[in-house]
Amino acid sequence: MFFGAGGAAALLLSGCADRQNTLAPHSSAARSITTLWWVMFIGSTIVVMVVSLLVVLAFLRRRGSLDHVEARGESPRARNAVLVSGALVPAVVLTILFVYVLTSVPATAEPKPKDAKLTIDVGGKQWFWTVRYPAQHVTTANELHIPVGVPVRVRVHTDDVIHSFWVPELNRKIDMIPGYDNSVLLEADRAGVYRGQCAEFCGLQHANMAFYVVAEPRAAFGRWVAREQRPPAAGAPGATLFTQVGCGGCHTIAGLSTGTVGPDLTHVGGRMTLAAGTIPQTRADLERWIGDPQHIKPGNKMPALHLTGSQIKRLAAYLESLR
């Protein structure tokens, strides 16, 4: 029985080997969550083992294997042992766990504006993320850049259905409910790329609604902000085609179009992925996405425009140049 439980636990933990791993914390809040997880796991294991032992003893007693104990007059002691192990031990363990949970809450509580040095507004849509830096006048999509060691308040909202914002290695999960703003504090303790995910079923492409948090040194973050603040070069090859075939009706490119249905594409060429983490950002994948988006991400709001191969290549080259 214990081997089966251990095997099941190992199987479950093997699912944590990817880049969304609650047990690999990279912030103080995430470490608090990880410690809580291990404490709960150990405490629960103790309770389960005690209860399992009592079940085994009850089974042996029913089979008559413990009759000799009663014959020696030791049944009162056995009953006391059962009482202590079956009631007192679980009660003590659960009380300790409850108190520890209460002491862990402040580390992951909703941040106040004064707690952060940077604020980012994130919006959830079916099925991508809008990202805006109000103080820096930067708008992007599906990627958050934050400076290492700086507390960042991420303020979330949604205009359609319930979503959930979660970066397991940096902090807890928070819900995004229409008409209500929520927030969480992200403070990475080292540079890296941390994968996030919508953790609330929000429709057909819920599983393909991911994002990345790029934590970088403050100087690198400053350079990224400066690049994002610069508008794309006017008159770039492919810009006219972008508006002619209707892309500008849904997407914004600073100085060229103001569509709001899809993600902002002002600097799309500098992002790591396409379609909210669905496919990598490469020329071949970009061409595939432009040519038949419904095949890659069925149900998204981007229609197939039935473009020629030449048009697809020109659009892909233009979008790739937007860095």
Image (tube, rainbow, N blue to C red):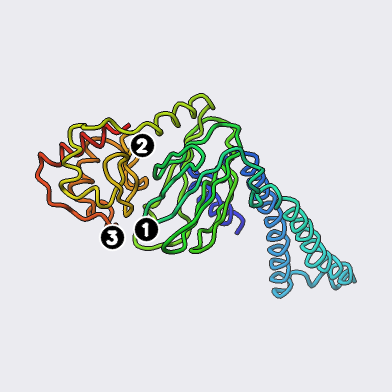
Tag 1–tag 3 contact (CB < 8 Å): no
Query: Within the image, what quadrant is residue 288 found in?
Result: top left
Position in image of residue 12 (x %, y %): 52, 52
Tag 1–tag 2 contact (CB < 8 Å): no
Q: Amino acid at mark 2?
A: Arg
Observer-nearest of 268 and 37: 268
Gap between marks 2 and 3, in whole Å? Answer: 23 Å
Residue tagged by mark 1? Answer: 126
Observer-nearest of 137 and 87: 137
- Element assignment for label 1: loop
- Left or right: 9 as drawn, with respect to 305: right
- Element assignment for label 2: loop
For the N terminus, the quadrant is bottom right
- Left or right: 322 as drawn, with respect to 165: left
- Element assignment for label 3: loop
Query: Within the image, what quadrant is residue 181 found in?
Result: bottom right
**Upstream in sequence: badge 1 or badge 2:** 1
Residue tagged by mark 3? Answer: 299
Gap between marks 1 and 3, in whole Å? Answer: 9 Å
The local crowd at label 3, few if under 14, some if 14 to 19, many if 20 or more residues have their Cα within 10 Å, is some
Q: Amino acid at mark 1?
A: Gln
Position in image of residue 164 (x %, y %): 49, 56
Observer-nearest of 116 and 205: 116
**Upstream in sequence: badge 1 or badge 3:** 1
The local crowd at label 2, few if under 14, some if 14 to 19, many if 20 or more residues have their Cα within 10 Å, is many
Position in image of residue 95 (x %, y %): 79, 60
Q: Is residue 175 above or below residue 143?
A: below
Residue tagged by mark 2? Answer: 271
Position in image of residue 295 (x %, y %): 22, 53
Query: Within the image, what quadrant is residue 24 found in?
Result: top right
